[in-house]
Image (tube, coloured by chain):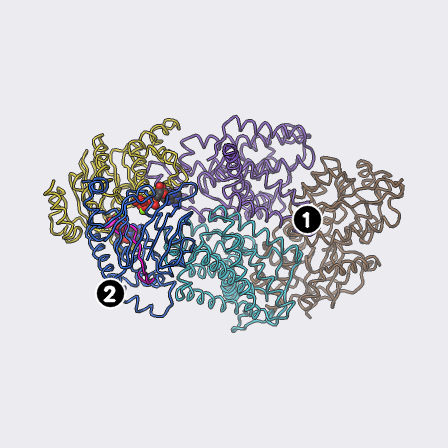
Amino acid sequence: MLEVKALTKRFSGLVAVDQASLSVAKGSITGLIGPNGAGKTTLFAMVAGFLQPDGGAVHYDGRDITALAPHVRARQGIARTFQIVQPFEGLNVQENIAVGAYLHTPHADEAMRQAAEIAQRVGLGGDLTKASSDLTVAGRKRLEVARALATKPRLLLLDEVLAGLNPSEIRDVLPLVRAIRDQGVTILMIEHIMQAVMNLCDKVYVLSQGRMIAQGEPKAVCEDPQVIEAYLGHGAAERLRAEQAHA
Amino acid sequence: AEPAPVKVGLLQPISGAFALDGDLARIGAEYAVKEINDAGGIKALGGAKLELVLGDSRSNAEAGAQATEELQSAGVAAVLGGFASGIALTATQTAARYDLPFVVDCAVADTITERGLKNTFRFNPNFSMATDVALKNLVKLNDDAGKPVKTVAIVHEDGLFGSGLAKIMQQKLPSLGFQIVETIAHPTPARDMSNVVLRLRALNPDLIVPSHYFNEFVLMARTLQQQRVRPKGIYAVFGGAASSYRFVNEFPEAAQGVMDCNHWGDPKSPITAKLRETVTAAGKFYAYNTPINYSLMKVFAQAVEKAGSADRAKIIEALAGGEFDSGIMPYGKTKFDAKGQNLSALPLNTQVQGKDIKVIYPADYADAKPVFPING
Amino acid sequence: MLEVRDLRAGYGGTEVLRGVSLDVKAGEVVAVLGSNGVGKTTLNKVLSGLVPATAGSIRFNGAALEHAAAPQIVSAGLIHVPEGRKIFPNLSVRENLELGAYCRPRRGRAEKIEQVYATFPKLKQRARQYAGTLSGGEQQMLAIGRGLMGEPKLLILDEPSLGLSPLMVEEMFALIARLAASGLAIMLVEQNVVQSLELAGRAYIMENGLITLSGLATELKSNAELKRAYLGL
Amino acid sequence: MYSPQIVVEALLNGLMLGAIYALIALGLTLIYGVLHIVNFAHGALLTVAMFMVWLACARFGLDPYLAILVVAPVMFAFGYALQRFIIGPASHGKDNGILLVTLGLSIIIENALLAAFQSDTRTITSDYSFKVVELGPLLLSFPRVVGFGVTIATTLLLWLVLHQTDIGKAIRAVAKEKLGASLVGISVPHVYAMTFAIGCACLAVAAGLLMPSFYVSPKTGAAFVLVAFTIVVLGGMGSIPGALIGGLLIGVVEAASSLFLGDSLGQIGIFLIFIVTLLVRPTGLFGART
Amino acid sequence: MMRPRLPTLAIIVVALATIAFACLSGALLNLMIFMMIIALAAQGWNILGGYAGLSSFGHAAFFGAGAYAMAVLQTRFGINAWIALVVGIALGALVGAVIGFLSFRSGLKGSYFALITLAFAEVARILANSTDFTGGAAGILLKLQTGLPYLQFADRRYFLLITIGFVAIGLLVSWWLEHSRFGAYLVALRENEQAAQALGVDVFAVKMKAIAISGALTAAAGCLYAQNYLFIDANVAFGSWISIEALFAAIVGGAGTVLGPLIGAIVLLGLGELTKCVSGGIPGMDLLVFGVILVLSVAFSPNGLVMLMKSLGLRAPAKAKEA
Ligand SMILES: Nc1ncnc2c1ncn2[C@@H]1O[C@H](COP(=O)(O)OP(=O)(O)OP(=O)(O)O)[C@@H](O)[C@H]1O
Ligand SMILES: Nc1ncnc2c1ncn2[C@@H]1O[C@H](COP(=O)(O)OP(=O)(O)OP(=O)(O)O)[C@@H](O)[C@H]1O
Ligand SMILES: [Mg+2]
Ligand SMILES: [Mg+2]
């Protein structure tokens, strides 16, 4: 469904993404992990059209979309969330989500109805009239997801939506992500919380210093010494191994 | 019983950019009202007193229109003043809706009287009349001195006033034997006159003809002095500063010899001296607004006498048909033409000489001989 | 050293803290745990003077701080390393550290910076770089380093591991352990419950603006209810 | 068309006038950079400073350049109080609030000056007013040359303050991260007020440099605001070097275009340069991209 | 957000018209015409500055375009006033589109956008002041001739009704914004442009529409101004006073609200007239008082008068309940 071909992005001297390629199969949940500053968010921005790459191409559904504007990509079904949440501060929760819903309906009533429905689904059902600035970090992350869902995407790009949740909350969110996938939305997600990555992802890519250093099944990737060296650290790798053994 | 007073509106910029002018005008008008009332008021109305109602045009057109409306509501018999052309244009129009007589003081745009508004009169000379006089006297001045001036540069502010004058100058000067080497426009307010002066230095004209407001004139004169540009003469038309005692006081060197063709009261009249005293006593510098508004009020009083009524239509009729004594303005008899322009209105030529501003033309009013050319 | 009693605070009309009481003793690491939005960050903000307390008391080394302004609190040695780091992106790393000692006399500042560099050698390498260009982990180190420059007696860390890669998280906890070992009192707010409880001596569990459970970390770790609610086990 | 001497002189003159513009813009850009406010009262505050210089000279017989030493601290204190006790509390930190409050303040200041001084124009005559510096065949106005030198020095000083002192670092810190600043014990309202105060002190310096060759009336400042805004944007909002370079650039552009287009149309030159720069480089010459 | 319903708007408009017809004459009538013109200009500003969050300091560009179109078409080409009005409004939209195209393509926003609009307006002012086509510095004087085809009336209440009609249109446009996708998109891009883009909002197109509508409304105000005062020049039509007046009225009343600009215009200009009474003969004293009241009003109603009224209105019943 999504093919990222040798994308490169430079920021005045710094090569943030260096010839990185990945592919996301339709109906899958694909993970993208890597150390802080590896270029994951930058890669997302290029896929969603917010940054123009210095080299390489993005193919979506077999078509080259590298030159398309972000709103055009959104209309074609690509939705993203922002790592640093970006709510419409002056709007309440329902209105925030409605802006996404307007993509498929020009009617205010319909958009608000859909918004309420989606809010329910992501667990913001009780906060419809709350100002988005009054939500906690986690609430805002949900709002990000809800807004993206309201555009009825076919490909959903999630950037660290689980950060700041405690283990039990994470456990509660995992089914939600799967449910979204099961309704036919393909997901590409950036995550540092390995518990989630191991549980959700069909395939994982590891980006380090802009380069793709590993890819494959989550379990295999976590065994990769290069990945352990650059990203997991031996402690976390141990812990993961132990957890996997438990499960 | 005491007869009902006659209310007369004075529309002047009491606040805003032109506030100083408005203040000077008010002093003149108030002085005249006091004089008239002290002398027994309007005889034809059984000694009715004049009552001055002040309207603040805040130096802009909408406020001018609004103030005119307010004067109308206050029940004035006529409005005098206006000061700037833009304000006078909208204010007279507003007054026209009520057939309220409006006599303009020193706004000079020809268009003010050319629209044929029945209610509108102008006491002072308009652009065309003033420039005609200015040019005639310039030729005389030059001829008398043995034709030292051949080349002229015009420096003007880019508003209605400066641009209008420059246009007429450009049309007429060449036919009078002067070569215009450059016409330089600048905005008001100007932050700097150096570039204008540099151009003047490069062109080195015999005569500079400026028309702009006080601040810009001061800037230019100072910069000319500093840059050592010494034309044979500076001949302003409606120059904001050349007829200002403040300028003469503060920059005697830069002001020396500057000539102006401007509204100016008769220097020989004893009332002129009194007005000057009053203005000075109020801590201000005397300028032409005071004698004009003084005289204008006098003209108005005569018109009411003539009309024998404070009725607007009758006053308009009286103004249109009559001949009036012009107070201390050098206009001979004031008489308005079919369009409402005072045909006998006339600017005077003045020159800064020593610490004073002297009238040099016309001979009837002159109290000094021109010093020309100034630099050798 | 820190005694909080019946503290209440909120934003606008909504009360977030509804009577919080807790203590931190000298040299101790205390963890404050709780779900999203229960008011942990709000508690920290009240302690550091960013949000006014509406009722209750805060005593720090004997001084009443519930109505004190931020500079006074910092001077007293109660230093808060906030959620989301809040370093100065347009200043160099070194300048960030210098400002950490804004409330302290200039004398001895250079030595203190050297001490921080010794703790975080990476910061020394980046001394002249703009802080905004640091990686997430480095920014977190800088935030803590800046806190240390203020000569803390008690350091409040709000979610220091948020958004960090597993390797970084590991390093971060190691570092906190070292700081604790040097005798510094630490109040640690974390979602990373497992590692926090390993590090802390005591812990408080916050729910809905109230402390609902507290005790020794080792005891809490095996508390069944806690396990279900926070560890997802 | 013009002799090289005239052109060179015009450009030098533009450069020197531009320096004074830069000084006015310096305060504006600093205030923008830290408080993120477009200070509409800047022009009115310049007028206040000019009146103070005028008072010091005309009433107390001070030399206009020495007057700076008196007026700058007064303006500093005035600016501090204005931000701390009026702009800050009244605007609630909202952009629109600040816009209205500073606009309102400019109305208040302008009219208070009008009430106090009438709309009269005031000038001072000092020994320097008509002095020139002769550089070979070039005649350079002495006050302008002084203005240029003092501007460069002031900019340098400001730069040093911002980068070497604690308060300077605090000002830069607050510009980008208020919360973090509070947490290291910086009082944000104090830093805001200090920034505003420094901006006002810069105006005092500009006023002292202008008065020997300019005039003041209650509306004088307005003539400089627009050009100062232009410079701030051109140089990049919040950038000190940007303000200096922008000011010099605008001065030169103004001189050149008024020499070749006339003073009136020449003003278009400024705005066109401004528009084109923004369209090509939307954050100005030295502005950081957000 | 305060969202008045259509009937409320209708009542307000009818009330204005009734006041106009029933009890005004002379100075008050004149003042009210000016209030309506400013309210209309402010409504134009509000579409862009209030809803879309693109504060402009240069709405004079649109106002002037309308005013000059009105004046030039009538005096130079003898075109009927009503046609000139339509052309003027269209020209306002076009000028908006041009300025918008250039600045939005470069991604200008915030203060940068505000100041570039100011620059455009200044360029227009300087050009209008020095071009003969626009009457140069002398400006343009329209002929005083009353009658429906001239859009001038002997009884000026009719002209006031027309201005009220335009204000009503402006209110309707704002009302529609609050109830439509387009309006939601405007607010979304005001709050966060990137996020809006991510949700499929064609930010550029939405902004272009907004500035065109905004330009058209403000240009209509310019047309009416020219027709009312029958004289314009560059400083009147393109001067920064109108940019500031429009922005002032909208923000004081409440930016991004339906009724804000109207209320702001009425309060500001009404206040201006009232403070004239307190000048006590000291020049500038009235404006000084005006400025002080302005600052105080911002201090005590930071979200605009509309919001202040709303919160007062809401608090009253709450208090009643407590009692
Ligand atoms: N607009 C920008 N200008 C300059 N440098 C940038 C910009 N955006 C990102 N970078 C740099 O590019 C690199 C990659 O950043 P990116 O945000 O993609 O990392 P990441 O993998 O998402 O990290 P994290 O896990 O911490 O979110 C970093 O070094 C960052 O500082
Ligand atoms: N600035 C604010 N204005 C209004 N309400 C706020 C504000 N900040 C936080 N809140 C509200 O206060 C409550 C507590 O928030 P707080 O940030 O203290 O929670 P937390 O426990 O730190 O959560 P997290 O784990 O997400 O950081 C939340 O309901 C939140 O919506
Ligand atoms: Mg990232
Ligand atoms: Mg928190």
- Alpha carbon distance from label 2 to label 1: 69 Å
Query: Is residue E30 positioned above or below B259 on the image?
Result: above
For discs 2 and 1, the disc positioned in front in the rendered view: 2
- Amino acid carrying mark 1 in the image: Ser
Under circle 2, the secondary element is helix
Which residue is nearer to you in this view: E199 or C54? C54
Chain with blue colouring:
C
- Numbered circles on residues, count: 2
Q: Colour of chain A?
A: yellow
* Residue at 74% from the left image edge and 55% from the top image edge: B288
Going by the image, does B232 lie left or right of C189? right
Residue neighbourhood size for the residue with mark 1, other residues' Cα within 10 Å, grouped as few (<14), some (14–19), many (≥20): some
Chain with purple colouring:
E
Chain with brown colouring:
B
Q: Magenta stretch?
A: C148-164
User: Quarter of the image containing the C terminus of chain C?
Assistant: top left
The answer to which image quadrant residue E233 occupies is top right
* Residue E239 falls inside the magenta stretch: no
Chain with cyan colouring:
D
Which residue is nearer to you in this view: B301 or C145? C145
User: Quarter of the image containing the N terminus of chain C?
Assistant: bottom left
The answer to which image quadrant residue E245 occupies is top right
Q: Which residue is mark 2?
A: C118
Under circle 1, the secondary element is loop
Check contact, mark 2 vs mark 1: CB within 8 A.
no
Disc assigned to residue E279: 1
- Using the image, name the chain to which the residue with label 1 belongs: E
Query: Is residue E255 positioned above or below D156 on the image?
Result: above
